[in-house]
Image (cartoon, rainbow, N blue to C red):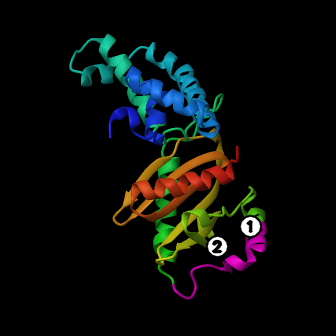
Amino acid sequence: MTERTRPVSEQDIMALVDGELDPARAAEVEAWLADHPDEARQAEGWRRQNLALKSALDPVAGEPVPGRLSRLAGGKSRRWLAPALSAAAAAIVTFPLGLALAPGNRVDVAPGAGERLARSGIAAHRVYAVEVRHPVEVWGDEEQHLVTWLTRRLGVPVKAPDLAAKGLRLVGGRLLADGGRPAALLMYEDRGGRRYTLVLERVSPARLTAFRYESSEDVGAFYWVDGETGYVLSGPADRAALLEVARAVYGQINPG
């Protein structure tokens, strides 16, 4: 199969948006998008996100480089160091490949808060995912009661995403205590009995932060913050598969 007949993948679309395709392949992908309006809208959304990031990060590149970072650069030219720092910041923020920031949003979560949230989510997953008789307090067949109860306790909307398309069914959920704060855990299970947990907690407001990945032995987790809610999706440490589930969760919590 030649490059001209190679099917267009999501990676191709993201590479197009990021300006990483050669002109010939870029033209092919653009032509394909013209015939696929849903994917074209997604690509346009990613372009807008890139513009928002550029607008937010460009001023940083012009700021004086801190002395301690200049020393780390071994005396190299500031002209080299500032763009490198800006590129590194962009790489950290845009890791989720199109699920990071929408135009006008900001990343103002307190340093370390996301990591703490991730560790708490992974710890809760380890405790409850192995339970056989009592994995949850309210079972999935009482979903409406479950989300109403958890919403009232957390003070932020709680929704149980329908992940049937990913082969996951809702087992149920429970209330957690995280450092004296209420948190919610929703548990899902695949046909092979592997479990995924979504932990939600009220946090300091932030419009939207990027997906970040954390792993501990055999458990992986994607975590992010949207508005006043922090989310941690934990499951088997298969990063690519877990990212697909995280995207499905995000898409239902933030439709459109």
Say which residue label 2 marks. 173
The amino acid beneath tag 2 is Gly
Quadrant occupied by the C terminus:
top right
Q: Is residue 34 above or below residue 216?
A: above
Q: Is residue 125 among the parts visible in the rendering?
A: yes
Q: Position of residue 88 (x, y in %)?
A: 38, 29
Q: Check disc 1 and report its element: helix, strand or loop.
A: helix
Instruction: Return the residue nearer the eye: 50 or 12.
Output: 12
Residue 157: quarter of image: bottom right
Magenta part of the chain: 132-149
The amino acid beneath tag 1 is Val
Q: Position of residue 63 (x, y in %)?
A: 45, 14
Q: Are marks 2 and 1 in contact (CB under 8 Å)?
A: yes
Q: Residue furthest bottom?
A: 133
- The residue located at (74%, 65%) in the rendering is 153
Q: Is residue 66 among the parts visible in the rendering?
A: no
Q: Residue furthest left?
A: 74
> Is residue 133 one of those drawn in magenta?
yes
Q: Is residue 213 above or below residue 110?
A: below
> Is residue 208 one of those drawn in magenta?
no
Instruction: Return the residue nearer the eye: 182 or 250.
Output: 250
Say which residue label 1 marks. 147
- The residue located at (43%, 30%) in the rendering is 89
